[in-house]
Amino acid sequence: MDLGLKGKKAIVCAASKGLGKGCALALAREGVDLVINSRTKATLDATADEIRSETGVSVTAVACDITTPEGRAAVLKAAGPIDILINNAGGPPPGNFRDWSIEDWQKAINANMLTAIELIRLTVDGMIERKFGRVVNITSGAVKAPIPILGLSNGARAGLTGFVAGAARETVRHNVTINGLLPGPFDTDRLRGNMKLQAEKAGMPYEAFSKQQAEKNPAGRFGTADEFGAACAFLCSVHAGFITGQNVLMDGGAFPGTL
Ligand code: NAP
């Protein structure tokens, strides 16, 4: 299927690794020119080179923290008018809610709710004027089924999801859609890092623990960044203009509900 995206321009936030990189690559494979971002310049530049040499699209790499006003300004300036916005940032740390201060909450809400809302605010009217826009927010399966130790993520991402539920119904008339893509367990550095800690706590070797966790998923494995990127690219496609305000769960069937 031709997704109809050749020559469009996208910002993909937090895209040097993992799910953001999966989305950037999938869009680039459809001929989308990119502005990608993350904080570590060397990793980001290497990813930009990799995407350029595989796909031949234009890739501008902006090394900055997307959760700061300066970072967002730098990314938006480098991009100019865009057709597609993929919101992403690192997730907040796990813990016990009794230990979290107002500052901890403010940090999580800034990174995983307000940063995405601000980037939507600063780009959506241009998309409306040009009669095409696609926004995908990378959130988490925790929006659908909260994970107790990730309370900061559960709360901040639910706030973003609530905001989008309203805004997405306002923009769709202009062919501008806003959707959430909710990852369950995907084989990325973040998942591997979390599992190393859990394996240590459980007193198990990492490989055995990881295999056990993967087996628990109905699919018998973790998801891949390529699979995540492909779903993202479809939501960004010209064919997806009637899908808005949705939260698409990708978890191998782990959420046990009928709907
Ligand atoms: P990852 O493999 O660790 O990659 C994170 C990427 O984000 C890196 O490129 C990192 O580069 C960049 N980044 C982090 N903080 C940033 C910031 N403040 N500004 C700019 N770039 C930033 O993580 P992932 O697994 O792809 O996760 C992506 C998102 O999905 C996270 O919010 C995570 O919580 C969520 N999620 C993941 C899973 C999963 O199973 N993988 C499940 C549920 C939810 P730098 O560190 O160099 O900035």
Image: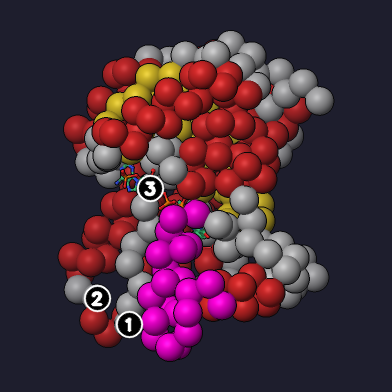
Please state if 116 lies on the left or on the right of 26 as rendered: left
Q: What residue type is labelled 3?
A: Ala
Front residue (pair 144, 125): 144
Q: Which mark is residue 100?
A: 2
Front residue (pair 61, 179): 61
Disc 3 within 8 angstroms of ligand 1 (CB): yes
Q: In this view, does 111 lie above or below 132?
A: below
Position of residue 197 measured from the top left corner of the image (x, y, whole percent): 38, 75
Q: Is the magenta stretch mostly helix, strand or loop?
A: helix
Q: Quadrant of residue 227?
A: top right
Would you call the spot at circle 2 few (<14 residues within 10 Å), some (14-19), or many (20 or more)?
A: few
The residue that disc 1 covers is 96
- Asked if the residue at tag 1 contacts the one at tag 2, i.e. Cβ–Cβ closer than 8 Å, the answer is yes
The structure residue drawn at horizontal position 63% and vertical position 42%, both measured from the top left corner, is: 226
Nearer-N-terminus badge (3/1): 3
Q: Which mark is residue 89?
A: 3
Would you call the spot at circle 3 few (<14 residues within 10 Å), some (14-19), or many (20 or more)?
A: many
Question: Visible in this render: residue 92?
Answer: yes
Nearer-N-terminus badge (3/2): 3
Q: Residue 174 carries which label?
A: none
CA separation in Å, label 3 and label 1: 22 Å
Please state if 256 lies on the left or on the right of 44 as rendered: right
Q: Quadrant of residue 81?
A: top left
The structure residue drawn at horizontal position 73% and vertical position 75%, both measured from the top left corner, is: 256
